[in-house]
Amino acid sequence: MKRNRIALAGVGMLAAGVIALAGCASGGGGDGSGGGDAGASTGIVTVQSNEPQNPLIPAVTNEVGGGLVLQNIFAGLVYYEADGAMAMDVAESIESDDNQLWTIKIKEGTTFSDDTPVTAESFVNSWQYAASDPAFENQWWFANFEGYSADAVAEDSLSLEVVDDTTFTVQLAAPQSDFPISLGYQVFSPLPESFFDDPEAFGAAPVGNGPYKLDNWEHDQVISLVPNESYDGPRAAQNGGVDLVSYGTGEAAYADLLSDNLDVINPGVPPSALATYKDDLGENAVDQPAAIWEGLTIPARLDHFANDEEGLLRRQAISYAIDREEITDVIFEGTRTPAVDYTSPVIEGWNDSLAGSEVTHADAAKAKDLWAQADAISPWSGTFTIAYNADGGHQPWVDAVSNQLKNTLGIDAAGQSFPDLATLREEIKNRTLNAATRSGWQFDYPGAYNILGALFITGAGSNDGDYSDPEYDKLVQEGATAPSVEEGQKLFDQAQEVLFADLPVLPLWYRSTNAGFSTLVDNVEYGWDSWPIVYQITKAE
């Protein structure tokens, strides 16, 4: 099937620059299982969000503003419950005898919100499109599909076969034991025929098959979702709709939360309120672990930071100069945990004793020595700059890191503020940013490959520093295709040790869900991925 293609100036990222929430808190005891009687309440729930960077298309949206929309207007084969457990949505079964050839059956009678049917072809055509163009940042999700090509525009390249209206098969290039778990990510959503008629128009007014449908998009202000009466899956909306409201600062959102002008804060309370928010919100405060990792990307294209001896010495020096314990205790009031790897303690297989991870522990003397060794190769000049988005509450820690670098290394260091995440992401995507940048990853599915593949594999859409190491790529791909999750984890550990040897990104800390909700809503729960589970929130009109 020939498809029209949307011209994209940029395709965002749900990762580098994501902040979020997670865990399990409820004001009224929601169990996260979905279902129940649609319309359990009729009030419109307001949720803090931000303007999507990209058109609302699964192939190109992978940043938090658009991701929260797609998560709720589309229903994929599976979804994740609050604790990260996989559960069926549109899928009836996902089966394989060898973890390589998969047969997928979907439920009969499901439809998009325009009343057209969701069929096996809806999934196959959507996946073929997402994998067809290297300009799509979510293309890499199909790297283990037979027929995948990362470099060329190629229609219908994946080895997918429609068997009948409710059945299709997937041939992978190598066995992948966690393949079903990964299918909850939004890039695996189905698309209706109307998408292929006009992708550009669809991106502005998408038609999905999830618990909500798009009602109105007032750019830079609010995205309004209303219940989708056609959806009969396990995530039925329990409210009258959801307004995703854009805020310029976290402080503004928090002030509205305290006055009940905002129902749910997302991604979290601003640093200025971390010391008081539990007292402010009482039983409506949320504090729990989240699958969110944050780091500092130092692109090799920056002066003095090439992939050579000098560059590595300077990366090591900066990492040793950052006192993560001090910042997480003082700036974040103990609501962050210093990072010692490139995944998350929430993810199975997390390892806090990887070779090379000692570089995450502050050591001023070692930092000074390493910096001096680098200066002997090529003397330092200029300012070490850290770019960040002002709407994410990052200035306090960026200022703190800059001061630590000044005091320990004796260099000029400063933050570079961008008004919002979309603006920063555009600079990063265009490679026009001459600075290090704050990076973050909010896991899309509960597996280590999710971050190790997206952020560091050569050419991956979220590889902001353009890192490339053949040994690393080989280890990660072997881990992803290992016959068991346990065997794969051993290979992922080896891959992380390569990262510690190269240090393309410095691990900083793991986030927790430090959030809250107003007195007007009940059944509020934050998922393992840190996002509020909006469909189960109830609110009186």
Image (cartoon, helix red, strand yellow):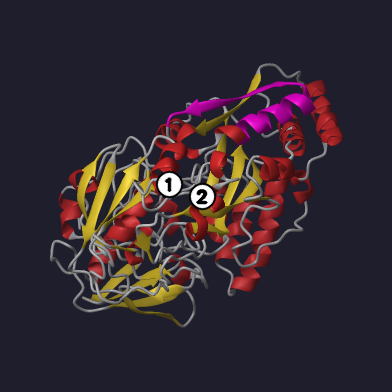
Q: Secondary structure at mark 1?
A: helix
Percent x, y for residue 49? 37, 46
Task: Please indicate whether residue 516 sits to the left or right of residue 353 in the image.
Answer: left
Q: Amino acid at mark 1?
A: Leu
Disc number for residue 258: 1
- Range of magenta residues: 397-419
* Depth check, front residue: 18 or 141: 18
Say which quadrant the C terminus sits in. bottom left
Residue behind mark 2: 280
Q: Is residue 269 magenta?
A: no
Labelled pair 1, 2 in contact (Cβ < 8 Å): yes
Q: Amino acid at mark 2?
A: Asp
Task: Please indicate whether residue 407 sits to the left or right of residue 454 in the image.
Answer: right
Say which quadrant the N terminus sits in. bottom left
Q: Earlier in the sequence, mark 1 or mark 2?
A: 1
Percent x, y for residue 192? 20, 60
Percent x, y for residue 473? 59, 53
Instruction: Please say if 297 is above or below 119.
Output: above
Q: Secondary structure at mark 2?
A: helix
Q: Tell me, yes or no, if residue 17 can be seen here.
A: yes
Disc number for residue 355: none
Q: Tell me, yes or no, if residue 58 can be seen here.
A: no
Could you give the CA–CA distance between mark 1 and mark 2, rounded to whole angstroms?
8 Å
Number of numbered discs visible in the structure rendering: 2
* Depth check, front residue: 456 or 221: 221
Percent x, y for residue 14? 44, 48
Task: Please indicate whether residue 298 sits to the left or right of residue 118 in the image.
Answer: right
Q: Is residue 398 magenta?
A: yes
Q: Quadrant of residue 327?
A: top right
* Depth check, front residue: 345 or 150: 345
